[in-house]
Amino acid sequence: MARNRYLLPYWTGLDYRKPRISIPIKITIKSINEVVTVPDGTFKGCLKIKNVGFAEKVIGTEWLPEEKVRIDRECYKWFAPGVGVIKVIFKEKETWIKGIASPPIPKFTEMTMQLEIFK
């Protein structure tokens, strides 16, 4: 029987550079009376919440040189009365700072989720 020769857990598509960072989040109620249209319909009197935060961390292993990463997150959530979450917009910017002579390399992610069917 062959033994796993890797000490770290691994799987297809794993990105060892993806940092695990705890990000403190500031939560703000932006509105208590939003009108929101999603594929399931239009909802009135919705609560809109904004979450924002960032964190920085120096990442490095015995195989990779130390690099600094900054992650900025922004998320909006809309809640409809009697339904719950009907829409979410999530944005993330991950910036790796490789060294003094290298410019920062940003990576952007944006995702929108909307209620399709409510029964």
Image (tube, rainbow, N blue to C red):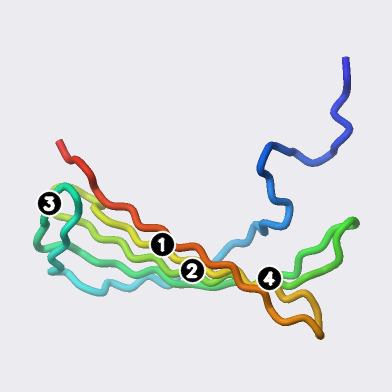
Q: Quadrant of residue 6?
A: top right
Residue 87 vertical position relative to residue 58 in the rendered view, above or below = above
- Nearer to us in this view, 15 or 83: 15
Q: What residue sits 22% from the left and 57% below the top? A: 79
Task: Return the disc, 4 or 3, that comes first in the chain's sequence.
Answer: 3
Spatial distance from mark 2 to mark 1, Cα to Cα? Answer: 8 Å
As shown in the figure, which amino acid type bears the numbered disc 1? Phe
Q: What residue sits 16% from the left and 62% below the top? A: 36
Residue at the spot of label 2? 73
Are the two marked residues, 2 and 1, in contact with CB atoms closer than 8 angstroms? yes
Q: Quadrant of residue 112?
A: bottom left
Spatial distance from mark 1 to mark 4, Cα to Cα? Answer: 19 Å
Residue at the spot of label 1? 90
As shown in the figure, which amino acid type bears the numbered disc 2? Arg
Are the two marked residues, 3 and 1, in contact with CB atoms closer than 8 angstroms? no
Task: Return the disc, 2 or 3, that comes first in the chain's sequence.
Answer: 3
Say which element carries label 3: strand
List x then y, in percent, for residue 101. Answer: 81, 85
Q: Which mark is residue 41?
A: 3
List x then y, in percent, for residue 106. Answer: 61, 72
